Amino acid sequence: MFDYRFMRHTGQSIAAGRRNSLMFGALQSLSLPDEAGQIDIAALQLGTDGPKVVRLQSSGHQVDLTEDNCTTLLLPRRGRLSSRLGDAQWHAAQSNGLLFGPTTRSTQVIGPFDAFALVFPHEALLRALAGSVRLPDGLNFRAEAPGLARMFRLLADIHDLTGDNDAGLPPAKAAQGLAAMTSDGLVDLILGQTEGDLPDRQPRSHRHRVLLAEEIMRTRAAEPLSMAEIARNLGISLRSLQLAFQQVRHMGPRDALNRIRLDMAHHRLLCAQHGDTVTSIALDCGVSHVSRFAAAYRQSFGEYPAETLSEALRRSA
């Protein structure tokens, strides 16, 4: 299921004391610089206990908060922010990123500010990382960090699903798939920042690992399958899985799964029967973002999926 919510803060001073918020676990204080200040928060939760994709727009604000159960990735598109965790100071400007684990922190946002955030259940992230790295309280990502631009695009695409309200949200079946994509993207980002600490110990087994992983992908392509789950099934670390695919396929495992799903959807569309739709076929093949699927399909097969479907239905009439 999807849960879309919107909140607007205005006024000189808002919120004092511990209480739940739309974006974080608990706010101690939230203040705006003047009476004309404003904060807009639009949050889309992917599943009942899944990650939350947030669009935060602010004229500037100061917030003191405690997050007990989630890791937060902040991706400013405009403006900048500074956060203090104990004696440590963290900064991020446009196109950079900050990652915070469960912490108590104080943040100053300089507006006009526009950012995406991914609020991810911390225990689920630890399971996905499977001991590959030990997460610090904070990580800073420069604009050129591997996977950062891709994460910007992913969160923007997910946020765009909401439109102006929740009427246009995709079927609930897509929520788990999108949650798996955010998990893989976040893990890729973290591992890319710490890859020097994660040597591959069995380079000769790369091809074998890839073949086994691709068999799992083909068998379970219709499911909301995460790369961490595939790695667990193979008894290897997620980083080893990623290295194997880069060596053998020159792409990441998530890209390989997307390719398999595209091929499955192409075959289904070629054999379509009355009552089939592009959306139903895409979802049956594990696709979570149908509009992105259409663009990728056209790039791969030279026509939009609706064109393939139309021709198949014409032939079967």
Image (cartoon, rainbow, N blue to C red):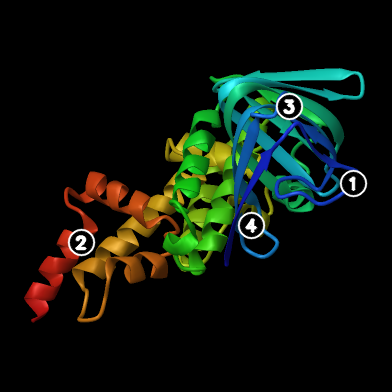
Q: Position of residue 29 (x, y in %)?
A: 84, 36
Whether pointer 4 and pointer 1 mark residues with C-beta atoms closer than 8 Å, the reply is no
Which of labels 3 and 4 is toward the front? 3
* 10 Å crowding of disc 3: few (<14), some (14-19), many (20+): some
Q: Position of residue 168 (x, y in %)?
A: 42, 61
Q: Is residue 115 above or below residue 162?
A: above
Which residue position is annotated with label 3? 139
Viewer-proximal residue, 209 or 10?
10
* 10 Å crowding of disc 2: few (<14), some (14-19), many (20+): some
Which residue position is annotated with label 2? 306
Which residue position is annotated with label 4? 229
Question: What is the spatial separation of the Cα atoms under label 4 and label 2, in whole angstroms?
Answer: 32 Å
Among the two numbered marks 1 and 3 on one chain, the one whose residue lies closer to the N terminus: 1
Which of labels 2 and 1 is toward the front? 1
Q: Position of residue 1 (x, y in %)?
A: 57, 67
Residue 284 horizontal side relative to residue 183, left or right: left
Among the two numbered marks 3 and 4 on one chain, the one whose residue lies closer to the N terminus: 3
Q: Position of residue 252 (x, y in %)?
A: 49, 40
Which residue position is annotated with label 1? 18
Viewer-proximal residue, 113 or 291?
113
What SS does tag 3 mark? Answer: strand
What SS does tag 1 mark? Answer: loop
Residue 264 horizontal side relative to residue 112, left or right: left
**Please, what is the three-letter code of the amino acid marked with disc 2?**
Ala
Question: What is the spatial separation of the Cα atoms under label 3 and label 4, in whole angstroms?
Answer: 24 Å
The answer to whether residue 96 is visible is no
**Please, what is the three-letter code of the amino acid marked with disc 3?**
Leu
